[in-house]
Amino acid sequence: MPRPALARPLAASGAVLAALALSACVPNASADDETIAVDSSADACDVATTEAPSGTVVFDVTNSGDDVTEFYLLASDGLRIISEVENVGPGITRQLVVQVPAGDYITACKPGMTGDGIQAAFTVTDSGDDVFSGDNAERLAAAGEQYLLYVRDQIQTLEDKTAAFLAAYTAGDDDEARALYADARVHWERIEPVAESFGDLDPMMDAREADLAEGEEWTGWHRIEKNLWPPAEGYDLTDAERQELADKLAADTAELAARVNAEDFAIDAFQVGNGAKELLDEVAAGKITGEEEIWSHTDLWDFQANVDGAAVAFGVLRDVTLESDPDLVEELDSRFAELNELLAQYGSIEEGFVLYTDLTEDQIVELARAVDALGEPLSRLTAAAVL
């Protein structure tokens, strides 16, 4: 199922995280709903207006291009899919109906269902009407469904970027492979708890050398990492060995995508909340210590990706949590913003980060403290949102 390759999230502010879709594609819109025309062509995504009042928003998406297209309404972090309409064939018009509160959003068309898509800002103003409806069980179910859309999007992008990385690696273009390595892994790290839930796939794809039991075969990202950044002479692999590693990682990534895209695969609100904390635990256990990317020293890409994923998980539960524990939401908004601001001093996923080995001890300690400051309130998210 093709998904958009979307932009890096902004700092996790309340405005960014407040949006929660309460309905996705609705078969029939009311005749009273004012529709917004969208024209998706080969090189443009023309949305008739960049603003709409909160409540039910209806997009009429027409494909004037020659390839199948998709249309998305995204949260302003560029990662969370509020709702989507897929597989809009040439000459076809399909409707997207979604309920959204006031806030900043992004519209995106993806002609040909490849690449990053064509994105633009979209604002939902406050109509004064109560957008949210239904009991907590319904809203929590919607949160799980929204998070699943995000996970599927990230895994599709992981497949695409892994394919490009492995193509360079097997071609012997080590400079290009090294340049693609960290950026591809971002999409694994953002959804790591979901990937780890498949116990057979995780060790084959992401095991570090230090994790291996005696005699255990080592495959996956970090085996290739050590080959690309050898600690000493004598760690060369033959072309056949490289191809074997690449084929294995590609097959395992495809299997991960197949499992997550299966019709019976679901994520509930408990898993979303617990996954947010697990992602911060991943930072504390491996990224902040420099142990995850011990050969490439690209730990800050992983660090940021784990924080991104935790912010998205918090985002889909934020509205429910705001009713039960507004002080917790305020604290989490603040802690996410502080940690993102601190990480931004060392780079970004788009522009690149400094290597872990370039950090001073004082800088590492400062990052560790910010992770701890976020981890404690994040550990209370599941209980506040779900119980």
Image (spheres, helix red, strand yellow):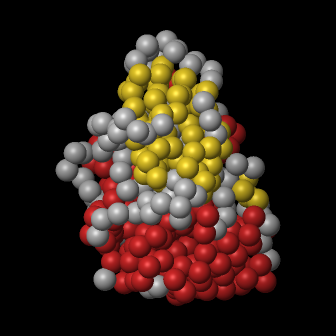
- Image quarter where the N terminus lies is top left
Frontmost residue, 28 versus 321: 28
On the question of residue 256 being in view, the answer is: no
Residue 328 visible somewhere in the drawing: yes
Q: Disc count in the image?
A: 0
Quarter occupied by residue 294: bottom right
At 46% from the left edge and 52% from the top edge, which residue is drawn? 55
Is residue 67 or residue 138 the one in the foreground?
Answer: 138
Q: Outermost residue, left direction? A: 264
Q: Position of residue 253 (x, y in %)?
A: 38, 45
Judge whether 227 appears above or below 346 on screen: above
Left or right placement of residue 367 versus residue 308 in this view: right
Q: Which quarter of the figure is the C terminus placed in?
A: bottom left
Nearest to the observer: residue 364 or residue 279: 279
Q: Is residue 373 depicted above or below 122 in this figure?
A: below
Residue 348 against residue 28 in the figure, above or below: below
Going 67% across and 64% down the picture, which residue do you hit? 11
* Residue at x 59%, y 31% (from the top left corner): 47
- Measured as percent of width and height from the top left, residue 145 is found at 33, 55
Along the horizontal axis of the image, is 384 left or right of 258?
A: right
Residue 148 image point, x, y percent: 36, 54
At x 44%, y 14%, the residue is: 90
Which residue occupies the extreme front position in the image? 32
